[in-house]
Image (tube, helix red, strand yellow):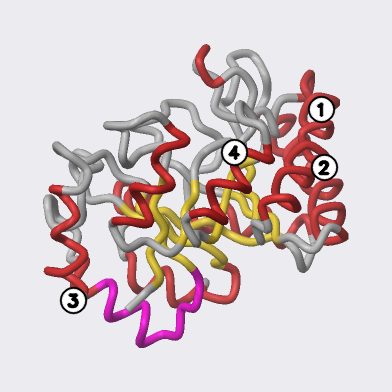
């Protein structure tokens, strides 16, 4: 079965963020991910990881003003300096956390700016970020996201992400494949993952509709977990879903769908 990481932004919201590490370990998770580490002292995060025997598997680069609705700045031509400063900040945290990879959220396309300009800005930013991230010993990821949850998000399809990676021309740029987002945008999950497996460095999950636990919607996760094993996917699977109720009470899917003890 795949290795599952608890997304601490989404799971264990019954307790404050820094207490979620212990909850994840108690629930049997070996890895954790979350959107951003930057509101916390890196020393505190490192201490929580070590105290609970957890591996940090992913976090995002700074993505603008999240509370104000921003969902990334990598495509914005007037935010290039801010984006590139965020590269250094992400490297600093990821290195201290021993996190092997970081993800870039492209952002929402602003009104009045041609798509070609946004695309060019994104590509140029990735051309700067990918080698810098590689020099630090980390992988860089980009993530297609559905336009139902985030209207106007720039990067929406696996094929689009692959074309951008080819245009950037770096061997250190990969795809974060979110099963939930891609079920909404393109379907054909199994064959798409297999066809792009060399480029997929991280997978995330949630069921659809609702973005809740596996087993609550239309996606056949029992099949999907076996399939990931059969094609040799060796990365982590981040549990980035919204529990329908109490997080721990909703973790029965781990046993039911994976056969875990």
At 73% from the left edge and 41% from the top edge, which residue is drawn?
Answer: 90
Q: Nearer the viewer, mark 3 or mark 2?
A: 3
**Secondary element at image label 2:** helix
Q: Are marks 4 and 3 in contact (CB under 8 Å)?
A: no
How far apart in space, not on screen, are marks 1 and 3 (Cα)? 48 Å
Q: Is residue 82 left or right of residue 11?
A: right
Q: Are marks 1 and 2 in contact (CB under 8 Å)?
A: yes
Q: Nearer the viewer, mark 4 or mark 2?
A: 4
Q: Nearer the viewer, mark 4 or mark 3?
A: 3
How far apart in space, not on screen, are marks 4 and 3 (Cα)? 36 Å
Which residue is labeled 2 in the image?
124
Is residue 227 on the magenta stretch?
yes
How far apart in space, not on screen, are marks 3 and 2 (Cα)? 47 Å
- Residue sitting nearer the eye, 31 or 171: 31
Which residue is labeled 3 in the image?
261
How far apart in space, not on screen, are marks 1 and 4 (Cα)? 14 Å
Instruction: Decide which of tag 1 and tag 2 comes sooner along the chain.
Output: 1
Number of numbered markers: 4
At 71% from the left edge and 25% from the top edge, which residue is drawn?
Answer: 76
Instruction: Decide which of tag 4 and tag 3 comes sooner along the chain.
Output: 4
Magenta highlight range: 224-235
Q: Quadrant of the N terminus?
A: bottom left
How far apart in space, not on screen, are marks 1 and 2 (Cα)? 9 Å
Instruction: Decide which of tag 3 and tag 2 comes sooner along the chain.
Output: 2
**Secondary element at image label 1:** helix
**Secondary element at image label 4:** loop
């Amino acid at each position: 079965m795949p290795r599952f990481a608890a997304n601490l932004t989404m799971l264990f919201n019954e307790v404050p963020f820094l207490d979620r590490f212990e909850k994840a370990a108690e629930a049997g998770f070996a890895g954790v991910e979350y959107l951003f580490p930057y509101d916390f002292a890196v020393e505190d995060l490192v201490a929580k990881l070590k105290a609970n025997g957890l591996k940090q598997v992913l976090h995002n680069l700074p993505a603008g003003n999240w509370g104000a609705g921003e969902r990334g700045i990598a495509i914005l031509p007037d935010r290039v300096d801010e984006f590139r400063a965020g590269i250094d900040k992400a490297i600093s945290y990821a290195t201290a956390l021993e996190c092997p990879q970081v993800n870039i959220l492209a952002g929402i396309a602003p009104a009045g700016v041609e798509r070609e300009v946004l695309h060019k800005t994104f590509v140029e930013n990735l051309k700067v970020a990918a080698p810098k991230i590689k020099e630090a010993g980390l992988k860089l990821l980009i993530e297609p996201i559905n336009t139902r949850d985030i209207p106007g998000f720039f990067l929406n399809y696996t094929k689009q992400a692959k074309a951008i990676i080819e245009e950037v021309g770096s061997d250190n740029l990969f795809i974060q494949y979110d099963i939930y987002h891609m079920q909404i945008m393109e379907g054909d999950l199994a064959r798409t993952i297999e066809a792009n497996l060399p480029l997929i460095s991280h997978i995330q999950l949630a069921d659809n509709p609702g973005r809740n636990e596996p087993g609550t919607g239309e996606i056949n996760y029992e099949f999907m977990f076996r399939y990931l094993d059969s094609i040799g996917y060796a990365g982590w699977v981040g549990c980035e879903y919204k529990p329908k109720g109490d997080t721990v009470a909703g973790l029965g899917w781990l046993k039911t769908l994976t056969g875990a003890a």
